[in-house]
Amino acid sequence: MTLLVIIIIEREDLEVFSFIFGAVIGSFLNVLILRLPEHKSIVTPRSACPSCNHIIAWYYNIPLFSYIFLKGSCAYCKEKISLQYFIVELLSASLTLALFLKLGISNEFYFMCLLIYVCITLSFIDFKYKAVPDYLLLIVLILSFFASSYSFLDSIKNAFLFSGAFVLLNFVITFYIQNIKSRVLKNEDLKTQEALGDGDIPIIATIAVILGIKAGLIAIFLAAIFAIIPSIYSNIIKKDIQTPFIPYLVLGMLSTYFFDLENILKVLF
């Protein structure tokens, strides 16, 4: 009985630790999101307020708590700080905890954590710049082979089948957009638009490696559903025909992975 209580306490401690650890990592991911696209050092200088450039003291830089305590404002100039910082930290913390609950302490847990951290970074960079560094895409793809529950050969096969199919689909849809839709709508901008960006294909391959073909298709379907409303908003309100798709691909992958949607659909149908 005593041993059982100790194990439960240790398990609960690890759950709390995983959440805190994820929040700390999320704080670092914010640095990556801000600095990598601008080719700045991720080590120096220390974090500063984007409005007044005042170096942020460590006690004003505690993940999650500092943002809540300061009510989303700079402690020095009182200017509002982007909600992105809080969202990234909360996402990183929540997903780390979710992974621990799903996988426990294992090699798959470590590699999935790394993969998800890079995916978060890619998603927010894509939201802001609509372009992502190629080396981050390569890192995600490599990590997926270590995090996958499939054998290496099956993972390779799934990646090639899935990404190859979407390369072909991208060609067909892009041809339609550039040669038919652009003429019907008389929109010159559409003549250079592609259905999928170059960065989407490695993420699609990653989805196949992690989830397999069947669950991967569910993830892609969900990604398309998630992207519909933001895409309509971007087209009509912002007059921007380009919608970053990587964040929705990642959201589709994580939804399918954590909720085990493939098995749920098997039971239902």
Image (cartoon, helix red, strand yellow):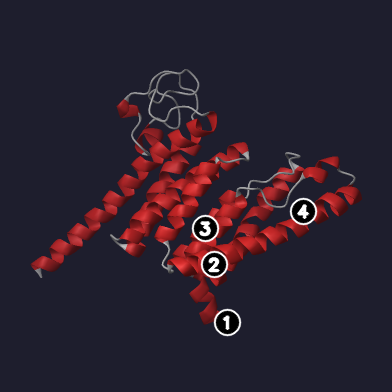
Up-down relation of residue 19 to residue 130 (above or below): below
Which residue is label 1 attached to? 269
Q: Which mark is residue 174?
A: 4
Q: Which of marks 3 and 2 is nearer the N terminus?
A: 2
Q: Which of marks 1 and 4 is nearer the N terminus?
A: 4
- Residue shown at the point (50%, 21%) measured from the top left: 51
- Residue shown at the point (31%, 45%) measured from the top left: 21
In the picture, the quarter occupied by the C terminus is bottom right
Task: Say which amino acid is labelled 4.
Answer: Thr
* Percent coordinates x, y for residue 264 in the rendering: 50, 75
* Percent coordinates x, y for residue 143 in the rendering: 43, 54
Alpha carbon of mark 1 to alpha carbon of mark 2: how far? 24 Å
Q: Earlier in the sequence, mark 1 or mark 2?
A: 2
Task: Say which amino acid is labelled 1.
Answer: Phe
- Residue shown at the point (61%, 40%) measured from the top left: 131
Alpha carbon of mark 3 to alpha carbon of mark 2: how far? 9 Å
The answer to whether residue 35 is visible is yes
In the structure shown, which secondary structural element does the residue marked by tag 3 occupy?
helix
Which residue is label 2 attached to? 158
Up-down relation of residue 109 to residue 89 (above or below): below
CB atoms of marks 3 and 1 within 8 Å = no
Task: Say which amino acid is labelled 3.
Answer: Thr
Q: Which mark is residue 206?
A: 3
Q: Earlier in the sequence, mark 3 or mark 1?
A: 3
Alpha carbon of mark 4 to alpha carbon of mark 2: how far? 24 Å
Task: Say which amino acid is labelled 2.
Answer: Asn
**Crowd band around label 3 with a 10 angstrom C-alpha radius: few (<14), some (14–19), many (20+):** many
